[in-house]
């Protein structure tokens, strides 16, 4: 048993074991045997529905859905830690699949906290009944994404997507891009400006938007360098009309989204960690079985040093991730700071782990069929996911020194 596992509850240990079996028996064999499929330009042909259905059978597709609606409800005191444990395991098999699933978890948390009861009943029921149904969270836009979370909090930083109330309906116009699950999702949580006269924190609302709503169009699937088994999308809203009750939060949506974003940072770092663990496992197996220069690779000092460095980075990421998860669970005042620290640290250190893994494989490391370069590409995506590394650093400093940290936006003087 690893050191970090000692703190697991029996439920967490059993869930992890079940998830690991699914990853080892189903996900990893599929990815290795079908490595060409991630390069298909037809997004519908990449990940077969059977994989999502398999995730559903082991109970990891609907985490966060209340038990009364048929979901697998977790202990609230340790829910964030459980999300992290399972996200790491899935990403060890494939981070794109992890992206698909964790969007459902995070949006489910948002719905159970913010959605009217009748909409919870409708969408949780559909999620349980349809193992292929995916959710998506639409915040990023072509001209503004993670930078808005510094926050600038000026009208100039407002969402370009607008929502106006007319005749008892909400009418949404705008465009969202870089949306995880955006190409595939059946339900979107959409953020839009509803008061252009105030700062972004006071004038942004969130809405529940079914994919089949007239005026909603999926413009494209974004072709990313890594994480390609999650279909990232661009969504257009043109006179999209919603019933009044599909408003989740009026004007204070960014403030209320903490129930989504704090667990999201933990899950993001955990997915990143899973990619690093996969790289370490593959590399350690390779160097203990491949002979170079008359001896097994691991007996070369340079190789052994790299492997030790990789293991140390992984455990350092795991330690910071665990501390951040504990802070979120306790609603500690430094939770936001630690979440951003964990996200930045994981994205940079795990990329180094994957680079070492690729280089330890020599020429094999850059061959597509070996799958090592895929882990490097997947890890690189995390530098730009759920806020860029530099924006996250701004947020760390701003949360630590709110009175003296620099202001990063506003009218030019």
Image (spheres, helix red, strand yellow):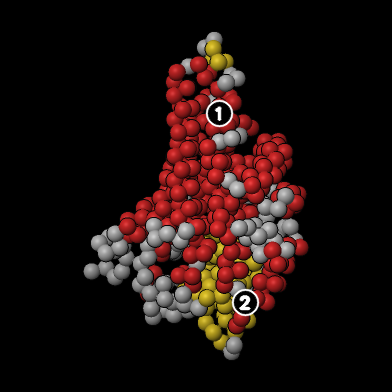
Q: Earlier in the sequence, mark 2 or mark 1?
A: 2
Report the front residue among 317 and 366. Answer: 317
Give above or below for 281 relative to 239. above
In this rendering, does residue 409 appear at all?
yes
Q: Mark number for residue 116?
A: 2
Among the 4 quarters of the image, the one containing residue 348: top left
Give above or below for 239 relative to 280. below
- Secondary structure beneath dot 1 equals helix
- Secondary structure beneath dot 2 equals loop
Residue occupying the point 41% across, 53% down = 338
In this rendering, does residue 160 appear at all?
no
Residue occupying the point 56% across, 41% down = 6
Q: Nearer the viewer, mark 2 or mark 1?
A: 2
- Categorize mark 2 by other alpha carbons within 10 Å: few (<14), some (14-19), many (20+): some
Identify the residue under disc 1.
283
Residue 379 location (% of width, % of height): 51, 42
């Amino acid at each position: 048993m690893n050191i970090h596992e000692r703190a697991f509850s029996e439920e967490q240990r059993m869930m992890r074991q079940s998830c690991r079996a699914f990853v080892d028996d189903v996900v990893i064999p599929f990815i290795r045997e079908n490595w060409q499929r991630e390069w298909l330009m037809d997004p519908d042909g990449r990940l077969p529905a059977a994989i999502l259905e398999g995730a559903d059978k082991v109970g990891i597709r609907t985490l966060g859905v209340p038990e009364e609606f048929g979901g697998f409800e977790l202990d609230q005191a340790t829910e964030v830690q459980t999300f992290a444990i399972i996200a790491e395991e899935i990403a060890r098999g494939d981070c794109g699949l992890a992206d698909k699933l964790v969007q459902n978890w995070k949006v489910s948390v948002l719905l159970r906290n913010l959605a009217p009861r009748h909409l919870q009943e409708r969408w949780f029921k559909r999620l349980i009944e349809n193992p292929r149904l995916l959710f998506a969270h639409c915040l990023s836009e072509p001209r503004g994404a993670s930078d808005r979370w510094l926050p600038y909090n000026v009208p100039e930083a407002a969402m370009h997507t607008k929502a106006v109330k007319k005749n008892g309906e909400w009418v949404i116009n705008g465009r969202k891009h870089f949306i995880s699950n955006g190409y595939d999702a059946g339900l979107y949580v959409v953020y839009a400006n509803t008061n252009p006269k105030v700062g972004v924190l006071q004038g942004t609302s969130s809405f529940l938007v079914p994919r089949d709503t007239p005026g909603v169009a999926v413009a494209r699937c974004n072709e990313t360098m890594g994480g390609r088994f999650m279909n990232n999308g661009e969504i257009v809203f043109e006179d999209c009309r919603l019933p009044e009750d599909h408003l989740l939060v009026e004007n204070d949506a960014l403030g209320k989204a903490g129930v989504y974003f704090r667990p999201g940072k933990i899950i993001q770092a955990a997915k990143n960690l899973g990619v690093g663990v996969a790289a370490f496992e593959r590399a350690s197996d390779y160097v203990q079985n491949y002979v170079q220069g008359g001896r097994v690779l691991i007996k070369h000092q340079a190789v052994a040093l790299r492997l030790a460095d990789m293991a140390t980075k992984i455990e350092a990421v795991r330690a910071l991730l665990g501390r951040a998860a504990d802070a979120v669970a306790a609603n500690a005042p430094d939770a936001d700071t630690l979440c951003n620290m964990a996200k930045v640290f994981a994205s940079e250190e795990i990329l180094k782990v994957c680079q070492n893994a690729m280089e330890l494989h020599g020429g094999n490391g850059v061959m597509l069929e070996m799958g090592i370069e895929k882990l490097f590409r997947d890890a690189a995506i995390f530098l730009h996911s759920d806020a860029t590394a530099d924006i996250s650093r701004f947020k760390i400093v701003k949360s630590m020194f709110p009175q003296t940290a620099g202001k990063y936006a506003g009218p030019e003087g």
